[in-house]
Image (cartoon, rainbow, N blue to C red):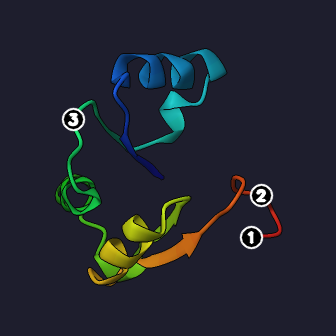
Amino acid sequence: MAVASRSPTSDVAKSFLQRLGIQLLFLTQEIFSSWTHKTEHFQRIHATTGVPFTEMLFFDDEDRNIQTVSKMGVTSVLVGNGVNLEL
């Protein structure tokens, strides 16, 4: 698993993962404070893990991210209110 997040407070996001005790579940954490394109996150994830885009699964709450990343070959799921087992 990997994290792909844009946040104006990337330090807070990283701290949150640590406090939850789940940071070690992720092979890579692409958390940027700048407003980069999601494609950059996935290019870095691919470079780090070697996992092909067509074997990745992406959940996001922004349709524009879903559309952009889907064009890379990533299976993308739009979530309205978080990820759950039903999804």
Q: CA distance from mark 3 to mark 1?
A: 29 Å
Residue type, label 2: Asn
> Which residue is drawn at the image coordinates 48% and 52% (left, top)?
1
**Badge 1 is on which residue?**
87
Q: For numbered disc 2, what is the local secondary structure?
A: loop
Q: Residue furthest right?
A: 86
**Badge 2 is on which residue?**
84
> Which residue is drawn at the image coordinates 49% and 61% (left, top)?
62
Q: Could you tell whether 68 is left or right of 59 in the image?
A: left
Q: For numbered disc 1, what is the local secondary structure?
A: loop
Mark 3, mark 1: which one is toward the viewer?
A: 3
Q: Are marks 3 and 2 in contact (CB under 8 Å)?
A: no
Residue type, label 3: Ser
Q: Are marks 2 and 1 in contact (CB under 8 Å)?
A: yes
Q: Could you tell whether 55 is left or right of 62 in the image?
A: left
Q: CA distance from mark 2 to mark 1?
A: 6 Å
Label number found at residue 43: none
> Which residue is drawn at the image coordinates 80% and 62% (left, top)?
85
**Badge 3 is on which residue?**
34
Identify whether 52 is placed above or below 5: below
Residue 13 percent across, percent down from the top left: 46, 25
Q: Could you tell whether 23 is left or right of 32 in the image?
A: right
Q: CA distance from mark 3 to mark 2?
A: 28 Å
The first of marks 3 and 1 along the sequence is 3
Q: Nearer the viewer, residue 14 or 6?
A: 6
The first of marks 3 and 2 along the sequence is 3
Quadrant assignment, res 66:
bottom left
Residue 32 percent across, percent down from the top left: 27, 35
